[in-house]
Image (tube, grey):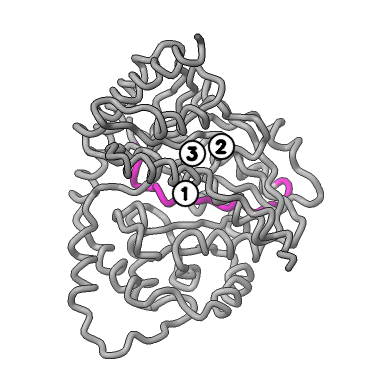
């Protein structure tokens, strides 16, 4: 039986493909420090968990396709705290940020249309593009300058008659880069000049460091018809299993069209919306504490990486990821070797080879991404094991 080209071409997760090697290592008794995936160890707020514990309805019913009105109204208040002025009707609650991205692509693009995305990018963008028949046009950024955006001239050269949007992740996964307002405005100037949507993935909004300030695409004047924002509660509240996100645009025609896709999947998870709603009014000290913790973890990982000879790594200013260019040729081989053959006192480290975050072939092959989602003590152990493993691996391939 023949499968669809879509099924044949969709990318397998470059992060999860290493899990069989990790599972085999665990069966041998090796303890693994998981720095490969953005699953925080921060506790989910009790305000959310109490919703699940105390849910008293006898029927868990369908909700509105656009999302619960209660939740959308409270989201308006949340965004107002971040100087983002929207209305409840500008919001479609989605089944996580993933569905929001799919809806954005389905609504903005026809099959064969193009979307320009700075690479390295969140690897699932590849899968979403394949599912929707959209072609990703990669805009390569580099570790040497902290993955800063290229010149406007280089970006404009990628625009063709099939280009429908520019897509950003700010703060960035996997890079941790934060685009200042001037850079967001520069992208918007290009979008306005070429009548392109800008899809902005802003799920790490709270996680910025070193005095950086996050700028939302919805905060840029003149972008009312072109700005599309994607969001999610997964990382904000350390609630990755509560699949609630949203798609936001002030373009009423866009939202009206996207709602039809929302209707086709009936509704986002009802009880998870109640849980997400309960977290909106969490005291500010929650985020101050969490951000301070991630900042400390970021410093630990960066400082440990600086002890590696010939490494290229600029300190990231957002999210909870860091990419390092290593003095080796094949990070994928190194990652597998760390799981299959190496341990230090019965322990090893799992990280994500970064080539899977690029669309351009053979780029990023000597780069790795770490998610600093473990406590400080475990991070120091993990990074020590990583450095010792890298030395052993280098000696092995050089002899």
The numbered disc on residue 120 is 2
Q: Residue at x 32, y 76 (%)?
A: 271
In the rendered image, residue 194, in percent from the top left (x then y), is placed at 73, 48
Sequence order check, earlier mark of 2 and 3: 2
Q: Are marks 2 and 3 in contact (CB under 8 Å)?
A: no
Tell me the tag on residue 181.
Answer: 3
Mark found first going from the N terminus, 1 or 2: 2
Q: Secondary structure at mark 2?
A: loop
- Residue 216 shows which numbered tag? 1
Secondary structure at badge 1 equals loop
Q: Are marks 1 and 2 in contact (CB under 8 Å)?
A: no
Determine which quarter of the picture holds residue 85: bottom left
| Residue contact between numbered discs 1 and 3, judged by CB atoms under 8 Å | no
Q: Residue furthest front?
A: 28
Secondary structure of the residue carrying tag 3 is helix
Residue 29's spot in the image, x, y percent? 27, 40
Q: Residues within 10 Å of mark 3 (few under 14, many from 20)?
A: some
Observer-nearest of 169 and 378: 378
Above or below residue 241? Residue 40 is above
Q: Residue furthest right?
A: 161
Query: Magenta residues, as a range?
Result: 193-208
């Amino acid at each position: 039986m023949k499968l669809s080209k879509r099924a044949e071409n969709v990318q397998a997760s470059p992060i999860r493909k290493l899990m069989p090697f990790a599972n085999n290592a665990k069966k041998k008794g090796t303890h693994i420090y998981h720095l490969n995936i953005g699953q925080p160890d921060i506790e989910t707020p009790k305000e959310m968990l109490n919703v699940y514990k105390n849910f008293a309805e006898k029927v868990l019913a369908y909700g509105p396709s656009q999302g619960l009105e209660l939740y959308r109204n409270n989201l308006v208040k949340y965004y107002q705290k971040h100087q983002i002025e929207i209305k409840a009707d500008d919001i479609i609650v989605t089944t996580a940020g993933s569905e929001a991205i799919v809806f954005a692509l389905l609504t903005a693009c026809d099959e064969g249309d193009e979307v320009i995305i700075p690479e390295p990018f969140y690897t699932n963008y590849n899968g979403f593009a394949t599912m929707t028949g959209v072609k990703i046009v990669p805009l390569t950024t580099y570790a040497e300058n902290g993955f800063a955006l290229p010149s406007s001239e280089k970006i404009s050269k990628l625009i063709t008659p099939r280009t429908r949007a520019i897509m950003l992740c700010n703060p960035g996964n996997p890079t941790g880069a934060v685009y200042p307002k001037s850079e967001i405005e520069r992208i918007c100037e290009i979008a306005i000049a070429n009548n392109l949507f800008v899809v902005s993935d802003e799920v790490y909004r709270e996680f910025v460091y070193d005095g950086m300030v996050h700028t939302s695409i919805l905060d840029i004047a003149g972008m009312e018809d072109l700005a599309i924002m994607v969001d999610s509660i997964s990382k904000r509240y350390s609630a990755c299993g509560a699949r609630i996100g949203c798609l936001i645009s002030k373009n009423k025609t866009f939202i009206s069209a996207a709602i039809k896709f929302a209707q086709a999947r009936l509704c986002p998870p009802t009880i998870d919306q109640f849980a997400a709603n309960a977290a909106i009014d969490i005291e500010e000290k929650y985020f101050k504490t969490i951000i301070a913790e991630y900042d400390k973890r970021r410093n630990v990982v960066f400082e440990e990486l600086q002890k590696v000879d010939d490494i290229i790594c600029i300190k990231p200013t957002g999210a909870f990821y860091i990419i390092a260019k290593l003095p080796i040729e094949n990070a994928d081989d190194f990652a597998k070797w760390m799981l299959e053959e190496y341990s230090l006192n019965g322990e090893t480290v799992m990280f994500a080879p970064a080539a899977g975050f690029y669309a351009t072939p053979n780029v990023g092959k000597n780069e790795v991404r770490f998610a600093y989602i473990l406590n400080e003590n475990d991070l120091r152990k993990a990074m020590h094991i990583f450095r010792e493993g890298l030395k052993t691996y280098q000696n092995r391939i050089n002899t």
